Image (cartoon, helix red, strand yellow):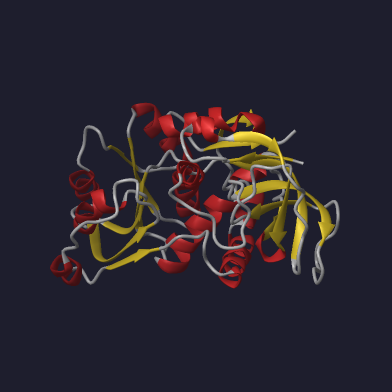
Amino acid sequence: MHAITIPEPGGPEALVWDEVPDPVPGEGEVLVEVVASAVNRADILQRQGFYEPPPGASRHPGLECSGRIAALGPGVSGWNVGDEVCALLAGGGYAQRVAVPAGQLLPVPQGVDLRQAAALPEVTSTVWSNVFMIAQLRPGETLLVHGGSSGIGTMAIQLAKAVGARVAVTAGTAGKLDRCAELGADILIDYREQDFVDELKKATDGAGADVILDNMGAKYLDRNVRALAVNGRLAIIGMQGGVKAELNIGMLLGKRAAVSATSLRARPLEEKAAIVAAVREHVWPLVAGGHVRPVVDRELPMSEAAAAHRVVEESGHVGKVLLIAP
């Protein structure tokens, strides 16, 4: 088969479409014939040499895919060869075939194109696990999403609105904010021109956000804590703004607030399987009912992964960029 390899870390040109050995499904795994994968920020970090795959995971980038089951490994039940699926991966999505733990498989939701289903596993698992399982967003509460036009952001907006929450977003252009509004965002903040703490306080009569989903890390830590409501919960899922910052514990105590920080890729298989099962139970009916949909900016051939990485790094896209396998 062919897959994207990274002979040496570097820029987008470091991604090489090359012939590699076929994966073999092990105990509890299935082999998926990949139709599409999606580009995530973690793939860019891996390409640059900053984010190694977990032990035992494929060395090829790609944290999600869609396709058809080509073979079942030992001990797998409940799935059949030919089933159309999408999957959460620890790596290997940028390839024509990938071995996947059965617990990380999802059926393609009703009404979703097989290719576009590749845009769902990572964002739904990330948002559901952080915003709902950990931060426990409830109907009537306010969620602040940083990077509202990203793949994560576009899914967070839709899921929060589907459960009856109010959604505030930050984005860097009027066009991106317009797209967020189309998805249901109520409070639109241009982070280049406005201070999100002030704008959020104005829009919530001084209360702030009950939950904040943050991809920036250090750069936003102090302002995120200031933007939290009493009993607020800050969920950090990225470090685009750095890794070290001071935390005002006094302010955190005064607000009886909480800060959590998680990653998905390196979690134990049983934890990822539990998240995927929760997504299937809670999110898939919303997708099938048309309340939530994948947001895809564009599709490119998988062999042109370098071009897709450039698109994501330039941040001009909204939603996900897909890679289509030959």
Q: Is 195 drawn above or below residue 236 in the view shown?
A: above
Q: Quadrant of residue 212?
A: bottom left
Residue at 58% x, 50% y is 63
- Residue 157 is left or right of residue 67, and the answer is left
Where residue 57 appears, x then y in whole percent? 61, 58
Front one among 33 and 276: 33
Report whether residue 271 is seen. Answer: yes
Q: Is residue 261 left or right of residue 13?
A: left
Using residue 58 as the reference point, say whether residue 306 is left or right of it.
Answer: left
x and y percentages locating residue 91 in the rendered image: 60, 52
Q: Is residue 315 visible?
A: no
For this orientation, the residue located farthest to the front is 8
Give 121 or 131, whichever is nearer the viewer: 121
Q: How many numbered discs, if any? A: 0
Residue toward you, 320 or 303: 303
**Location of residue 320 by image quarter:** top right
Task: Name the quadrant of the C terminus.
Answer: top right
167 up-or-down from 27: above or below: above
For image coordinates 63% across by 39% down, the residue present is: 4
Please indicate whether residue 53 sits to the left or right of residue 261 in the image.
right
Residue 168 at x, y = what percent? 34, 46
Instruction: Spot the residue most to the right.
Output: 81
| Rendering coords of residue 312 (x, y %) | 47, 34
Residue sitting at x 43%, y 33%: 313
Where is the N terminus found, in terms of image quarters? top right
Query: In the picture shown, does residue 159 fall above or below 194?
Result: below
